[in-house]
Image (cartoon, grey):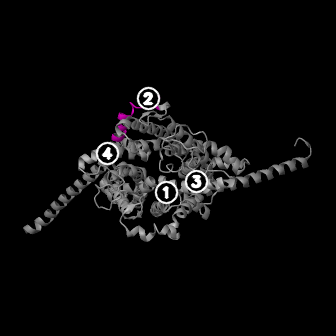
Amino acid sequence: MSGVPNTIAGDRSTALARRGRRRWTEAFVSVVLRLCAFTAVAGLLLIMVFVFREALPILTDPEIQREASIAKFFATPLWQPVGDVPKYGLAPLLVGTLKVVMVAMLFAVPIGVLAAIFASEFAPPGAREALKPAIEILAGIPSVVLGFFALIVMASWLQGLTGSVSRLNALNAGIALALGVIPTIFTVCEDALRAVPRSYREASLALGASRWQTAWNVTLPAAAAGVAAGVLLGLARAVGETMIVLMASGNAALVSASPLDSVRTLSASIAAELAEVVFGSAHYSVLFFLGAILFVTTFVINVAAGLFVERLRRRLAGA
Amino acid sequence: MSAAATGPLAGGLARGRAARRVDAAGWGFTALSGFAALLIVAMVAVIMGNIVWFGWRAVTWDFLVKAPAEGMTAGGIFPAIFGTAALVVLMVVALVPFGVGAAIYLHEYARPEAWFTRAVRFSVNNLAGVPSIVFGLFGLGFFIQFVGRGMDRALGLDVVWGQPSLMWAALTLALLNLPVVIVTTEEALRTVGHDQREASLALGATRWQTIRNVLLPQAMPGILTGAILSVSRGAGEVAPIMFTGAAYFLPYLPASPTDQFMELGYHVFVLATQSPDVDQTRPLLYGTVLVLLLLTFALNLTAILLRARLRARLAGRS
């Protein structure tokens, strides 16, 4: 502009230049933002590729298969990865994970779902105001702190209560894990219950149903898909949670049905053993294989939970 | 005759009994749900009470500013505090631009039905559900073994990048927290009304100018909320950093992104499980837990307050 102040042609050309620059900036920005969004896709893909890649030698490398293969995982009931003849039997880890997760869900599902029903249907305002921050606090406690509490404090209380031989066991880890999972279940369930339109409740109450009848027969069925999603998301968290079980379960790889025996889970095995493992060894690949199992399991559960959320949204939108 | 009279009467009585049974069930159900809620509050109170009761005496000035001494049975936790701070700062620097960019793309540019948009949303949802220990495996397999070793080979270095370090741990945590930032930023963008976007566009501003000058300033509290939440989560996550950079004990502070570091959460784990003398380290352990909790809660509280303000604005608009 400064060079040719008075000609229309000059004005136009600078304006055109500016517009061109602007268009270029716009295109550039939209590409950059798209790339940012792509990092989420890339992240998930890279996790999948790199966890599977390090686990792959178990299926392909004959050298490693002499020590660990799918067949060997189930040929022995022993998990003894360190020793002259390492044994990689998955049974104790699978049983251990199942036991801890079952204990956790046994506590977390009734408490989480019932508390969510209480918060959305029955609670007087004062009680709600006490419950919500409690849930926020519980959700904010890092899992290592829950693990610490279970290890140092709760284990002794529970041992006094049950008289169990091992202080750290599936019951202890399961209850601590329930504490970690309750906020997830509660939050998702409460959101689902609150999303049920008021008109549903009003219609039921107007027909003479009591408040609990309304909650049980109308609100809960309407929000059922959301409750299912909450339970599934809690389940996925319980399966993958590491620090709590690592600290509170005792980590003995036993195959037993008793919740009072010490257990070793898939996630805790990875956490406890990966630091000492030789890169590229059979043990290294086995631990990544455990990671792949965890990834696939939680992925499937999360996708299922997502489908339930979708169904709830469609159902309530159609209403 | 008498049968005809007692029929309806008996029926009425039965109905009355049934109604009473239903009422009892209703009362039981309501009470049970209240009990579940009470149980949660009580458990939180017990945990917090226990930690504060045994922890507050340990948290002195010396504890906060001194390094561990005598095989971690005495001294303070300054290196762990420093390491945690360095870790989350690096994480936020790596995380926020990508998270905010992705959220802007999803909310302002993307067509909701396009396959790319759906792929991104699917990934964000499922990334949030990947177990943290799997992030640890990924950090080791990808960042350290693949990228780090690759850089060392390419640059002809000995082992500089191909080992656990502050940077790899921060990047691993950044990926773990990506969904948090994307979701909160998108929520913040939703609070900016369409009228403002349209006004800006009508004045001749381009899309990017509108985003930079209208949307981002208004969405700032939401972006901040996401960043703070990710910091609070990042400060407490142990599983992803165990193999990617956190150290058991270091006599020096990390000076570069390629150094290892001590971290509060990992320090809690170490003190709780690897201590040779549990009774002697107990005060240190409780003190560390309390510091970690206070840090997380201070961050969470800030995030909650910011978010409440944002939600109030959203409610005022609709």
Few, some or many C-alpha atoms within 10 Å of disc 1 (few <14, some 14-19, many ≥20)?
A: many
Disc 2 residue type? Thr
Which residue in the structure is indicated by mark 1?
Answer: B130
B275 and A170: which is toward the camera: B275
Q: Residues within 10 Å of mark 3 (few under 14, many from 20)?
A: many
Report, in whole angstroms, how far the alpha carbon at label 4 lies from the one at label 2.
Answer: 26 Å
Q: Which residue is mark 2?
A: B60
Task: Determine the chain carrying the residue at label 3.
Answer: B
> Which badge, 2 or 1, comes first in the chain's sequence?
2
Magenta stretch, residue numbers: B46-63
The residue under label 3 is B144
Label annotation for residue A115: none
* For residue A193, above or below residue B247: below
As helix, strand or loop, the secondary structure at mark 2 comes to loop
| Residue beneath the point at 68% across and 43% down | B213
Residue type, mark 3 in image: Ile
Residue indicated by mark 4: A154
Q: Residues within 10 Å of mark 2 (few under 14, many from 20)?
A: few
Give above or below for A22 relative to A289. above
